[in-house]
Image (cartoon, rainbow, N blue to C red):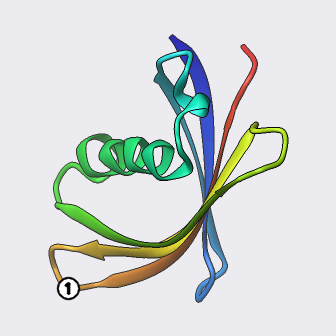
Amino acid sequence: MAHYRTVVIHPETGGEGRYDFEASEGLMDKSPVKVLRHFMEIVDRQILPAEHVDYELNAAMKSDNGKVVTGMGIMILDKGAQLPFVAMISERSG
């Protein structure tokens, strides 16, 4: 297993969260959409387990060196809240 970190920014409030998680060694070799999908499953099951989290992904891209995946979209919570976000995912050492 490899260790990854995601930084999520909420542009309307300026809020920021950092989330560490484990996944297979080859996660960053996958498409940006698949990397973000994996993280959003963690959000739904582990970070916000009391509330179903859906999302709409508006953009997903990978840096030229393939080490950072960036996504922009909207998290849609069961209670109706829609939260725009920017997420950056990278492998972390240690």
Residue 42 against residue 91 in the figure, above or below: below
Question: Would residue 28 appear left or right of 43 to someone viewing this image?
Answer: right
Judge by depth and name the residue closer to the eye, 52 or 1. 1
Q: How many marks?
A: 1
Question: Would residue 55 appear left or right of 84 to someone viewing this image?
Answer: left
- Where residue 58 sits: x, y (%)? 49, 76
Q: Quadrant of residue 52?
A: bottom left
- Where residue 13 sits: x, y (%)? 59, 85
Task: Classify mark 1: residues with Cα within 10 Å, few (<14), some (14-19) or many (20+).
Answer: few
Judge by depth and name the residue closer to the eye, 93 or 24. 24
Residue at 59 percent of width and 89 percent of height? 12
Q: Quadrant of residue 10?
A: bottom right
Residue at 66 percent of width and 79 percent of height? 14
Judge by depth and name the residue closer to the eye, 12 or 69. 69
Secondary structure at badge 1 equals loop
| Quarter containing the C terminus | top right
Residue at 55 percent of width and 20 percent of height? 26
